[in-house]
Image (spheres, helix red, strand yellow):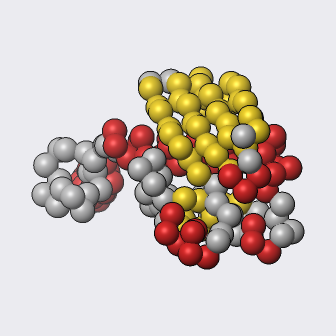
C-alpha cells in the first residue's frame, strides 16, 4: 500500500511540476508553439523616446522658464508635430502633459513646449526643443550606460 501511495504522490507531483513549468499562453500565440513574445525594437525605441522626453521636461535648468503659477502654463502643453505625435505619456507639475496641434495653439493663443528633433542611436540620444513663450531653445545629449542619463545640455535665448 505504501508503495502505491508513494508512486501516486510522485506521479501527481510530476504532473504538477510539468504544468507549472509550461510557459504561459501568449494571446498573440494561442497555440503556444514554443515562440515567446519579445518586445519589438519599435516599442523599445518608443519607450526610449518617451523616457528622454520626460527627462528633458524634468531638466532642472528649465524649471525657471515653466512658471506653473501662471494659469496658461498649467498643464504644460506640448506641440504635436513630425517629431512628437502625442501618443506618449508625459507629465509636468504632477499633471499629464496635454498635446496640442499648431492650429489649436494659434487659435487659443496657448503657450506650448516644442520638441523640434529627437535622434536616438544605439547608446546615445539628442533632443532639441523650443519654448517660444520664454524665447528659449535648447539641446540635451544623453547616453545609455545601463540607464539613460543626461551628459550635457545647452539653453540659448532666441
Q: Quadrant of residue 105?
A: bottom right
Residue 107 appears at what percent x and percent y? 56, 75
| Quarter of the figure that contains the C terminus | top right
138 vs 40, nearest the viewer: 138
- Tell me which residue sits at (42%, 40%) in the image: 45
Image label count: 0
Residue 147 seen in this snapshot: no
Name the image quarter holding the N terminus: bottom left
Q: Is residue 15 above or below residue 141?
A: below
Query: Residue 79 in the image: x percent, y percent?
Result: 54, 59
Task: Look at 70% across and 69% down and name the residue there.
Answer: 75
Residue at coordinates 25% horizontally, 57% vertically from top-left? 26
Q: Seen in the image, is 84 located left or right of residue 33?
A: right
Q: Judge by depth and name the residue closer to the eye, 127 or 23.
A: 127
Query: Of 108 and 65, which appears nearest the observer?
Result: 108
153 lies left or right of 2: right
- Whole-percent x and y of residue 72? 75, 72
Name the residue: 13% across, 57% down.
31
Q: Work out whether residue 48 can be spotted.
A: yes
Amino acid at each position: 500500500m505504501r508503495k502505491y501511495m508513494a508512486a501516486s504522490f510522485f506521479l501527481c507531483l510530476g504532473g504538477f511540476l510539468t504544468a507549472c513549468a509550461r510557459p504561459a499562453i501568449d494571446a498573440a500565440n494561442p497555440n503556444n508553439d514554443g515562440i515567446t513574445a519579445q518586445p519589438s525594437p519599435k516599442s523599445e525605441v518608443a519607450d526610449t523616446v518617451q523616457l528622454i522626453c520626460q527627462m528633458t521636461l524634468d531638466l532642472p535648468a528649465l524649471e525657471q522658464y515653466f512658471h506653473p503659477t501662471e494659469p496658461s502654463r498649467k498643464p504644460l502643453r506640448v506641440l504635436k508635430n513630425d517629431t512628437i505625435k502625442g501618443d506618449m505619456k508625459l507629465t509636468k507639475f504632477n499633471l499629464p502633459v496635454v498635446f496640442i496641434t499648431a492650429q489649436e495653439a494659434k487659435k487659443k493663443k496657448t503657450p506650448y513646449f516644442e520638441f523640434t528633433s529627437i535622434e536616438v542611436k544605439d547608446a546615445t540620444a539628442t533632443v532639441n526643443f523650443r519654448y517660444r513663450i520664454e524665447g528659449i531653445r535648447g539641446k540635451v545629449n544623453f547616453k545609455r550606460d545601463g540607464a539613460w542619463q543626461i551628459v550635457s545640455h545647452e539653453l540659448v535665448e532666441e
